[in-house]
Image (tube, grey):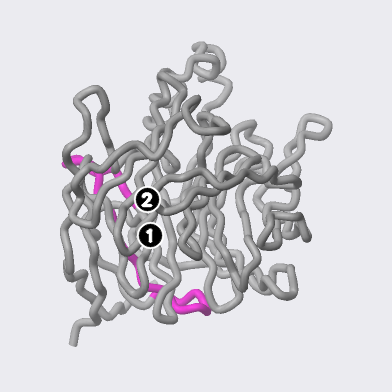
Amino acid sequence: MMFFLIGFSIIVVDSINLSGMPDSFFLHLNEDITGFFEVAFTENHIYVSQIYPIERKTYIFSFDKKGKFENFLSSQGEAPEKYGFFMWDLKFFNNKLYIFSGSKVLVYTEDGKFLKSSLLIHTPNVCEEASCVKNNWIIWGESWDFVKGKYLTENCVSEYDSLFNHIDSYFKPKLSSKYLNNGLLTACFCGCSGDGKLYLVNRPNPEIFVVDIQKRKMIKKLRLRIPGFKKGKLANRKRWKAEGKMSDTEKYIEAVLDWTKTFSFITNIVYTSGFLYLCYRDWQKDGLVYYLVKIDTNGKTLSKTGAPGNLIGSEKNLLIFSTSPHTLLVCKVEDNE
């Protein structure tokens, strides 16, 4: 099939170099395994979480808007209530910073004062991201059950009120059994909320599940056609187990990195200005290459271009990319004439 795409340009509005951290720490913003870091922007600060897999610790650093290091917000064991290895999201909402870790959410003021914590019940097995929609919190991720030697999907969207009381859990995605029964789930989800809908992406394959938040159900499934996108291959989990990589964190991460080099991997999707912007990466001979794809809400691919780095989020109508271990680019998108 021929693809005729209208091009667009990514224009850098601001470049932020994060600097001034203590020598005992390193910061690496473009790790190939998603979830190694999270970034939250406010009018005055940039908060960055960094996971150190060997230490199995998470640290959170505060920078001013020019990228100069300010201080530690907190780190594992130093907060009023510790959070652990799987700190999976940071969100700034109503002048408060929300730290999502495992099945807890910790709430801080903008200057780092601890306010409270809440226990989250009925979360997905592996939470990916949280978003506040009309004063309710929506959490989505990867959820499954293992029955009679097979993986079965469970509800992977959970909704909470403003005090994090559980309201409902819903949406069981229908996924190919070759992924579910492989023993290593490759279909974890990333997504974004906008216009009252969630757009949940199957990372190894270009398809989007559209979930209506008000109706609390999937309303359609979009199969994307992206030129040059290589669909996902199964991981050789049995071989990893035989080689002892499943029980060794460092070797396991290395094995996952090697495996993900064999296919295009969706790293993020954001909704802004009425369109979806999907970022994916490919391993090529000269290294890691990122692409940004513009998609309408009906799943039609409108345009594609090379991206300066990994898309890590959006601020208002601007896109945020991580381009090097310490650099963030704030960009706008313009269609070519």
Front residue of 128 and 302: 128
Residue type for callout 1: Gly
Tell me: 263 left or right of 215. Answer: left
Please check the rendered image and state whether residue 288 is part of the magenta-colored stretch, yes or no: yes
Q: Is residue 93 above or below residue 28?
A: below
Rendered location of residue 10, percent (x, y): 21, 69
Are dots 1 and 2 in contact, CB under 8 Å?
yes
Question: What residue is drawn where x is 31% and y is 48%?
Answer: 282
Residue depth check, mark 1 versus mark 2: number of the one nearer the observer: 2
Rendered location of residue 119, percent (x, y): 69, 43
**In the image, which disc is placed on residue 313?**
1
Please check the rendered image and state whether residue 277 is part of the magenta-colored stretch, yes or no: no
**In the image, which disc is placed on residue 39?**
2
Tell me: 326 left or right of 125. Answer: left
Rendered location of residue 78, percent (x, y): 47, 27
Q: Main secondary structure of the magenta part?
A: strand
Q: Whole-Å distance between the Cαs marked 1 and 2?
A: 8 Å
Rendered location of residue 175, percent (x, y): 66, 52
Residue stretch rendered in magenta on the structure? 281-301
Front residue of 124 and 162: 162
Residue type for callout 2: Val
Q: Quadrant of residue 158?
A: bottom right
Front residue of 93 and 177: 93
Question: What residue is drawn where x is 36% and y is 72%?
Answer: 316
> Element under label 2?
strand
Question: What residue is drawn where x is 24% and y is 63%?
Answer: 330
The earlier-in-sequence mark between 1 and 2 is: 2
Taking the view exactly as shown, the residue that stands out farthest to the right is 148
The quadrant of the image that shows the N terminus is: bottom left
Q: Is residue 213 above or below residue 321?
A: below
